[in-house]
Amino acid sequence: MIPLTYLLSDTARLLRKAFDARVRRLGMTSAQARLLLILSHSEGENQAFYAERLEVEPISLARMIDRLVESGRVERRPDPADRRAWRVYLTPQSQEIIDQVRGCLSGLEDEMVLGLSAAQRQDLAAMFEAIRSNLTTVRTSEVPING
């Protein structure tokens, strides 16, 4: 039997690959698309916040934001609490591309669960929630090196 950790990891890899291909057709990288989606829920944070959420180095995020600023999709504003920091905001032009990215996600989800009944989809969502909750509470210092 294939270990669940491998199945989950490989499924996530395939899902990322499919998402990458879809957003590439919109003329952006998956990281840019993810940033726009995060901004649509938590706009106005400093760049460090978004780097952490995307799990990228701050310099990589800065370059990504530079490209999004050049394309007119986001803007930086000075942080009133820290004159060295910048806060990131969406521009009015970004809404159309965010809607397109959400459309990509919706179509991808439909593709992903094709052939599953509504009950199976609910069960799958509940299982993923339980797994996510378990992993959220695990502390890396408590995990044995061999396991």
Image (spheres, rainbow, N blue to C red):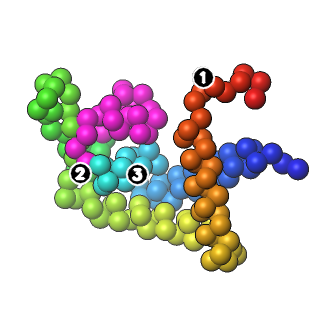
For the record, the magenta segment spans 43-65
Q: Which mark is residue 25?
A: none
Residue shown at 13%/25% (left/top)? Answer: 83
Q: Is residue 51 magenta?
A: yes
Determine whether the residue tagged by mark 1 lies in a helix, strand or loop. Answer: helix
Q: Nearer the viewer, residue 76 or 146?
A: 146
Q: Main secondary structure of the magenta part?
A: helix
- Lower sequence index among marks 2 and 3: 3
User: Which is in the foreground here, disc 3 or disc 1?
Assistant: 1
Residue 5 place in picture, x, y as percent: 73, 44
Residue highlighted by disc 2:
90
Residue at 69 percent of width and 49 percent of height? 8
Q: Which residue is mark 1?
A: 141
Name of the residue lying farthest toward the right: 1
| Discs 1/2, front | 1
Residue 33's label in the rendered image is: 3
Q: Secondary structure at mark 3?
A: helix
Disc 1 crowd rating (10 Å Cα; few below 14, some 14-19, many 20+) is few
User: Mark 3, residues whose alpha carbon is within 10 Å: few (<14), some, or many (≥20)?
Assistant: many
Q: Is residue 113 left or right of residue 145?
A: left
The three-letter amino acid code for the residue at tag 2 is Leu
Reply above or below: 98 against 122. Answer: above
Q: Callout 2 environment at 10 Å: few (<14), some (14 to 19), or many (20+)?
A: some
| Pick the front one: 88 or 126 | 126
Left or right side of 141 for 23: left
Which residue sits at x=38%, y=34%? 51
Q: Is residue 77 visible?
A: yes
- The answer to whether the residues at label 2 and label 3 have Cβ atoms under 8 Å apart is no
Q: CA distance from mark 2 to mark 3?
A: 12 Å
Magenta-drawn stretch contains 23: no
